[in-house]
Amino acid sequence: MNANTFDSDDSDSHTGDSFDEEGTSVSKPPPTVVLPAELAKELKDLTPADALNKLLSSHGASSSTAEDKEDLLEQEQFGHEIRFRREILNGDMLGLLERDSSIYYNIKALFHKLQNPMTNEAMFLLVTQAEAYLEQFVSQTQLLARTNELLTSQLSAQQHHFEQASSCNAEVTRIKAASSEALEQLVTCENNIAQWQSEIEALQEKIRQEG
């Protein structure tokens, strides 16, 4: 096998060269390399050796940055999984929610951070189940809260009606008492009038007898 050829399905392929229809060797154009604008500007004023060193160092820095980002993502993923096991699997998620409902959004944020391709299937299933339990608990809690509000409103309305009824009964009792007192006064007046009439008639009779 010729050392200047690649392992390819084209038996006539050569490094950097090809043949036209007449069999004449034609050089292939080199592949185009596109550099970032800032890097290309820096390389413009450098010598070939310095430019090569600059390219090599830039490539190494890019690779290092990518590896650093990947390591950081793995560390964050590990931290999220540790927190999930500590606070959700081994903790009391529902008890915490009962004491402080505002942590619902923090728990949802943790679930969202774990719903990514880096989470293995077993952990992903646990996160999905925990989120389902969370939503079910929140729905039941909201329903219970609405029921309590309705019950409180009904009790308040009943208390208001009872107070109104008590006030009406008190007014009726007062009116009855006032009516009874007025009737007693009327009877007293009628008795006084009858007595006065009797006294007047007796006086008139006495005057007639003396006359």
Image (tube, rainbow, N blue to C red):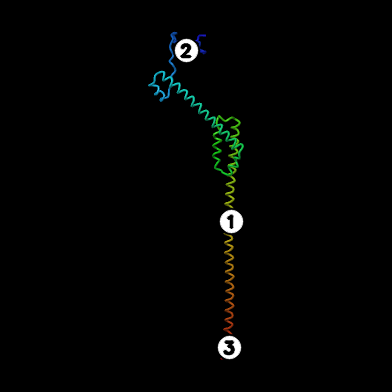
Among numbered discs 1 and 2, the one appearing first in the sequence: 2
Which residue is under mark 1?
Answer: 159
**Vertical side of 187 occupied by 145: above or below:** above
- Which secondary structure, mark 1? helix
Q: How far apart in space, not on screen, are marks 1 and 2 (Cα)?
A: 98 Å
- Looking at the image, is mark 1 or mark 2 nearer the viewer? 2
Callout 1 environment at 10 Å: few (<14), some (14 to 19), or many (20+)? few
Closer-to-camera residue (132/198): 132
Q: Secondary structure at mark 3?
A: helix
Query: Label 2 neighbourhood size at 10 Å, few (<14), some (14-19), many (20+)?
Result: few
Residue 65: horizontal and vertical position, in percent? 48, 27
Q: Earlier in the sequence, mark 3 or mark 2?
A: 2
Q: Residue 82: x percent and y percent?
A: 58, 34
State how far apart marks 3 and 2 are (Cα). Answer: 166 Å
Q: Amino acid at mark 3?
A: Lys
Residue 15 badge: 2
Quadrant of the rendered image containing residue 54: top left
